Image (cartoon, rainbow, N blue to C red):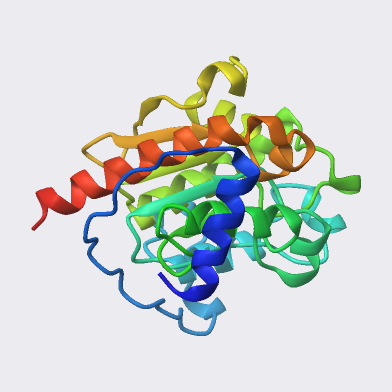
Amino acid sequence: MSINSSFSYLFFLKDSGVNSFLQNSPNKRYKAIKKDAPLDRASHPNNIQNIESLNQLEVFIKTSNNCPLKNQALNTVFADGNPSSKIMLIGEAPGAEEDKSGKPFVGAAGQLLNKMLAAINLDRNSVYITNIVPWRPPNNRAPNTEEILQCLPFIQKHIEIIHPSILVLLGGTATKAMLATTLGITKLRGKWYEYNSLNIKEPILTMAMYHPAFLLRSPGHKKETWEDLQKIQKKIITMNNENI
């Protein structure tokens, strides 16, 4: 862990009020970020079912008129991180800072997410991050049911292409949408679920957690989040050991 990551880790623990943690185990290093080739509009499929790459998916989403949110947003916020990672984080929707930058989780919630990742020896280069909705809803409101349904094929295809071993759902909106449930995040967090894709044979292990933005408003829940992070760390260590 770098010096900056170490400080982030300590700050997160201090804010969370925890006094124990998993012992580190040697982890396999993740590959460096793979940069997508420049967008090629001429070669992208017109049907989402025929999409086979992130480049094609990004073009498809950016040229889609399926959701009215696109017309009010500054940017399409596609994703950030390492496409080769086996850990995929899915949030709700971009906020104002994300809308300006075109990247997910770059505001205050993103800074807290960075600390959360550092606490379990991860960073933005070792995970893959996106949202269920790629455009900012007006006034930072939560996306409504219709908007989520309009964008659901995007995230389903996104998961299919990344094919992660672990999905982390950040917040109630993402969790309800991906697990197709009406239960609240308080009841859903901290447990392992299985996400099933039509085009992936094995179910994907899925963990629901509080959204970093919620933790900024309700810091008393950080200790529960640390417990959830420990479960993810333990699962990663187990998977790495099985692949040695």
Give whichever of 69, 243 is nearer the camera: 243
Q: In the image, what residue occupies the spot 37% across and 62% down? A: 52
Q: In the image, what residue occupies the spot 82% across and 66% down? A: 74
**Farthest-out residue, right:** 139
Task: Tell me: residue 191, above or below residue 227.
Answer: above
Q: Is residue 101 left or right of residue 198?
A: right
Give whichever of 224, 173 is nearer the camera: 224
Q: In the rendering, at what x and y percent does residue 225 appear?
A: 54, 35
Q: Is residue 218 left or right of residue 124?
A: right
Q: In the rendering, at what x and y percent does residue 131 appear?
A: 60, 49
Q: Quadrant of the C terminus?
A: bottom left
Q: Quadrant of the N terminus?
A: bottom left
Task: Tell me: residue 138, above or below residue 30.
Answer: above
Residue 214 at least partly seen: yes
Q: In the rendering, at what x and y percent does residue 167 appear?
A: 41, 43
Q: How many marks?
A: 0
Q: In the image, what residue occupies the spot 56% across and 77% down? A: 41
Task: Tell me: residue 198, above or below residue 84.
Answer: above
Q: Is residue 212 left or right of residue 41?
A: right
Q: In the image, what residue occupies the spot 19% across and 53% down? A: 240
Q: In the rendering, at what x and y percent does residue 76 appear?
A: 70, 63
Give whichever of 80, 143 is nearer the camera: 80
**Farthest-out residue, front:** 19
Q: Quadrant of residue 145?
A: top right
Residue 49 at least partly seen: no
